[in-house]
Amino acid sequence: MEEHDIISQDQHRTESYQKMKKILDTIHDRFINDSLSDTSLDWSEFYEFYQSYRSIMKNKKDLSDKEKKTVQKQWEDMLMSKRKTIGELFDITADKRKSNPARVSEKNKPFLSNNGYKILTEKGILDVLLDQYHEDQQQRDIINEFS
């Protein structure tokens, strides 16, 4: 009987995890979309460079080792620049979420304290989710399983 209980609990945990994953995926997607939509981030330079990079790399056998390293370094620099910009946009979105007066505990302590995308992985995100789903008891029950 005990083995059956363990298997049953494990199955329930797996089902709950899948449901919770959907909830977390939604909040992650919303965070990314909010971060990137609040800006006029210009991707044209990146796109042009990417097209050039692809073209060059198709013919990389024609390049010297030094030229390959130069092109690779330029590509990595471009990626790092865009990642930095996106990280800054994530920080702005996180700051907005952290400063939301509706996202505080009974002790007036903010649920979220980390920076950037890390707010999505801190314990307080569960409290935010409980607040967001205040009218959906089924979703709240799932979230509470992970609190």
Image (cartoon, rainbow, N blue to C red):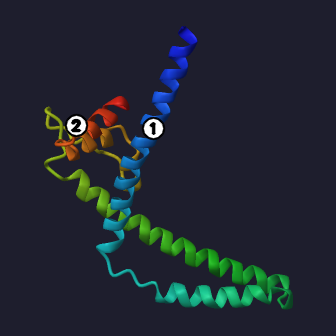
Quarter holding residue 1: top right
Q: Is residue 127 left or right of residue 146?
A: left
Give the residue number, with chain letter if any, for mark 2: 137
Q: Is residue 11 left or right of residue 36?
A: right
Q: CA distance from mark 2 to mark 1?
A: 17 Å
Amino acid at circle 1? Tyr
Give the residue number, with chain letter if any, for mark 1: 17
Q: Residue 89 placed where, x, y %? A: 36, 67
Q: Is residue 78 left or right of residue 99?
A: right
Circle 2 residues within 10 Å: few <14, some 14–19, many ≥20: few
Quadrant containing the C terminus is top left
Q: Residue 74 placed where, x, y %? A: 64, 81
Rendered residue at 56%/78% (across/down): 78
The residue lying toward the viewer, choosing from 82 and 38, is: 38
Q: Residue 94 placed where, x, y %? A: 31, 56
Rendered residue at 13%/49% (across/down): 101
Task: For mark 1, give the secondary structure.
Answer: helix
Amino acid at circle 2? Gln
Q: Is residue 2 left or right of residue 119?
A: right
